[in-house]
Image (tube, rainbow, N blue to C red):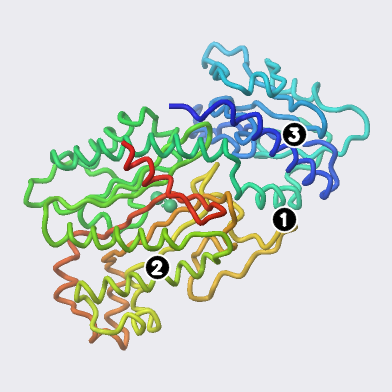
Amino acid sequence: MQAAARLYRPHIEVLSTRYDTALDSTGFDAVLIGAGVPVLVHRDDQDYPYRPEPLFLQWAPLAAHPGSALLYRPGRKPLLLVLEPDDFWHQPAPVPPGPWSKALEVRVIRHRDDIAKHLPAGKTRLAVLGAPLQWRGMALPGRLNPKPLLTHLDYERACKTPWEVACIQVATALGLAGHRAVRQAFAAGCSEYEMGLIFLAACGQTDAELPYPAIVAQNRNAATLHYQHRDRQRLPPRERHSLLLDAGCTHRGYASDITRTHAARPGEFAGMVRDMDRAQQRLCGLVRPGVAFPELQLAAQQEIAGLLARWELVRMTPEDMVARRVTDAFLPHGLGHLLGLQVHDVGGGLASRRGGELARPARFPRLRLTRPLTTGMVVTIEPGLYFIDSLLARLRRSPVARRVNWGRVAALRRYGGIRIEDNVLVTPAGHRNLTRELESAA
Ligand code: GLY
Ligand code: MN
Ligand code: MN
């Protein structure tokens, strides 16, 4: 599974045009983008897992080449400096074969300081991007991470080129293979720990390659939104109720972000998952250019209210549930976010290329995406409904507590919660659901 190589060169052309404008409007002639370096553990001789710089990956999908860099000068072929140190402790990763070897000028360097030898001479106004640690002690003749340039690039990167969409599709296909394997493992009674390993094996990635740590949550654990543990115990069949798996993969630096919730057996919870799935599909159906994401967030609250009424959890009209914030106790997170080089891609709140943050709606202070949707954006749509003790305790102390069917809440608490998450591309005609397209094709 590979993103089509023919899409890469046009991607570099779009990226070059974007950088030409970004550099010109922020007063630079050239930019050096570092791949980043691993961070050393305090008082140890080991590194934390290396996370490559997204802006570097956007040009050159070399995810295992710390210390490398890319130099872009308008009108010139981008120069990729690949660091292959002479090191008998570690093995440099080979440059993966691909169209970058022709579209970029590739030079191997042996020492981090060699980067300076390749910089333009004279009075070039150079911007240097990336984690400051990579540049420490190098005295490069440039401005480090100038905010106007970063803001311009962050704003632009929300809209994906066809190459980037293809990479997200491959990451999605890999993630779905992992989800299918875990679904079977759940049916077979595996533990969270085993399911985490099965996910990795099925998609062929290491933990460090995933865009975020997979969330493998059985039963009550699904009520913790970013549950991070892996219970080693296999549960007996009658104690297994639900599984929430929120797990994606990367391909050429791009992420997928997929959540599915499964019931252990047919019956009540399986029906609830189906209801949520339909609600999630209706929300995906609202994605189109020009829509303000906070409107979708409100639509999600209305869907959650409908489910609370349908499942006889709250005796109020759905309109009142939203108005009196009952739904906030069950859906405490944003409906979605930009997706791309990072799972929570940056720039979701930018007012323009020149910066300025769009105000987050007072009602939804955690919403990461406040920009109107535009063609080329890839967003997640991930409504959820959870039984979170601390939020329920607050609801119980509120004036609307008597409208809540607490007996039913107590009975459903063991399932933890439901989240369903797809990755959706905004198109001129509306949208394409990249996750469902691949799921139904499998
Ligand atoms: N996996 C984190 C999220 O869905 O945003
Ligand atoms: Mn997400
Ligand atoms: Mn997710």
Q: Are marks 2 and 3 in contact (CB under 8 Å)?
A: no
| Sequence-first tag of 1 and 2 | 2
Question: Toward the viewer: 143 or 203?
Answer: 203
Place residue 23 in its image quadrant.
Answer: top right
Looking at the rendered structure, the number of numbered marks drawn on it comes to 3
Circle 3 packing at 10 Å, graded few (<14), some (14-19), many (20+), is many
Mark seen at residue 300: 2
Q: Are marks 1 and 2 in contact (CB under 8 Å)?
A: no
Above or below: residue 298 compared with residue 87: below
Quadrant assignment for the C terminus? top left
Tell me the amino acid under the disc marked 3.
Leu
- Give the mark toward the camera: 2 or 3: 2
| Sequence-first tag of 2 and 3 | 3
Residue 216: image x %, image y %? 29, 46
Circle 1 packing at 10 Å, graded few (<14), some (14-19), many (20+), is some
Question: Toward the viewer: 9 or 53?
Answer: 9
Q: CA distance from mark 1 to mark 2?
A: 29 Å
Which residue is the site of mark 3? 32
Which residue is the site of mark 1? 353
Residue 203: image x %, image y %? 35, 31
| Sequence-first tag of 3 and 1 | 3
Tag 2 secondary structure: helix
Tag 1 secondary structure: loop
